[in-house]
Amino acid sequence: MGQHDTSHPRPLWLSRPIHSELIRLTIPTIISTLAVPLLGIVDTAVLGRLPDVRQLAGATSACVILSIVFQMFFFLRMGTTALVAQRWGADDRRGAAMVLFQSLAIAAVLGLGLIVLRRPIALIGFALVGAPEDVTALGEAYFAVRIFEAPFYLMTLALTALMRGQGDALVPMYIVLGVNTVNIAGDLLLVPGTFGLPSYGVVGAAWASLAAQATGWAIAVLVGWKRVRAYWDWGWLRAWRRLPWHRFFTVSRHLFIRTLTLVLTLASVTSRVARLESAPILAAHAILMQLWSLVSHGVDGFAYATETMVGAWLGRGDRERAHASGVAALLWGVGVGTLFGIAYFVGVDKVATFFTTNKEVADIVISLVWAVALSQPVNAIAYVFDGVLIGATDTHFLQNAMLTSAAVFAGTLGVGWLASGLSLQLIWWALLLFTATRAVTLGIRFRSGHWYRLDLETEHT
């Protein structure tokens, strides 16, 4: 008895329930995120088999624009997940339904706005891409169809965020897999022309994507409505001005600025590499970016799970378990990142030759694999702490940390450029310091404990 009383209990961050919940939420998310590049591979393979290579080039140029535009509004998923998790954790079901109503309303307005502004978006976007005229014409045809999926896509983000906030990662995974299945089937039917159908080429690929997003939206609506109908109030439509918008818009604004800064920073990496005007360097950079981003699909699963867990625990007023969830996710994320980093170091020759048979390109990849390898555990720290602070809706700090990291990136690149000229090595140094600055600033915030001392009051109307 006395021996039992003097023994030290296991720390919460090592407790089995914390890790079990983390893995339960993480695995479906990893599958979901890995399904996205798989779809891109199928799209590329189907369009790439057409006799006219301009079809693939046109779709690729349009996808660059659509990806940037859609990513800018990814705050809907992050903010809604955190706010719903906090309400759900506090057993405020009506509040969670209200958050969904607000998120859907904003998603619908933004989606319709993108459709209304589709021509100026296309004009500016394709001008920045700078593809040849014939390729741009095909890209514009693809864009003209796919832009109509914007409301479906954004509202699906809100609906799946509701599910994640409720601690359900499985249904969002099924929805992503369903969307991808419909898209792939549509590609195979409409792009080359199958079962007697004409070949619609790049436009057929666009219609397949639109049909897939509409299908995903319909499924998400059915599931989401079943979960919130008992707490839903159609009176919110008439009294929308009196709803508690302040916190929703504050969180959304911070996350929008944070995401926009991240997107622009990564876009500037690509534009700076293009300035080097070397095909081998461009090819090597593309391979390095694939290696760099591959691990993020795994580590992001832990970050997504942490958003839900931290939000729910803080909603219940349990700061210790919120903190423990963050530490547990950090252990898993850094562990995965370190393993991949070691694998890149050890197998760099095989990795390089897997992606290319060009010796010059392979040599460039091998010379810079250290940057990719070192970045893996650093990326993991940044991603996990990002998830913690999103779950806590400590979004103002997240915004400022991202702006600071972007400034470090720009400063490193600018000073190095002036001192020794622009090079791929310099660009990768700047990218590594960008992620390291994110990891350090967010890590300091996590250690301070200020992130879980925020006012998480429940709003009612």
Image (tube, rainbow, N blue to C red):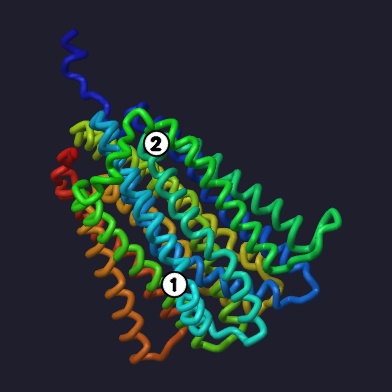
Badge 2: how crowded within 10 Å, few (<14), some, or many (20+)? Answer: many
Residue occupied by mark 2: 22
Secondary structure found at label 2: helix
Q: Which residue lies at the image location 42% right of the left edge and 78% below the top edge?
A: 268
Badge 1: how crowded within 10 Å, few (<14), some, or many (20+)? Answer: few
Q: Which residue lies at the image location 18% right of the left edge and 33% below the top edge?
A: 317
Secondary structure found at label 1: loop
Q: Position of residue 46 (x, y in %)?
A: 73, 62
Q: Does 215 sit left or right of 43 as displayed?
A: left
Question: Looking at the figure, which quarter contains the N terminus?
Answer: top left
Toward the front, the furthest residue is 238
Front one among 114 and 209: 114
Q: Where is residue 133 in the image (x, y as percent from the top left)?
A: 63, 87
Report if residue 447 is visible in the image: yes
Toward the right, the furthest residue is 196
Front one among 174 and 333: 174
Q: Does 142 sit left or right of 432 as displayed?
A: right
Q: Which amino acid does label 1 sit on?
A: Leu
Residue occupied by mark 1: 117
Please report whichever mark, 2 or 1, sits nearer to the chain's N-terminal start.
Answer: 2
Q: Does 23 sit left or right of 384 as displayed?
A: right
Q: Relative to 213, say whether 135 is above or below.
A: below
Q: Which residue lies at the image location 24% right of the left edge and 40% below the top edge?
A: 323
Q: Does 345 sit left or right of 15 as displayed?
A: right
Q: Which amino acid does label 2 sit on?
A: Leu
Q: Where is residue 17 in the image (x, y as percent from the top left)?
A: 35, 27
Q: Relative to 461, say whether 278 is above or below.
A: below
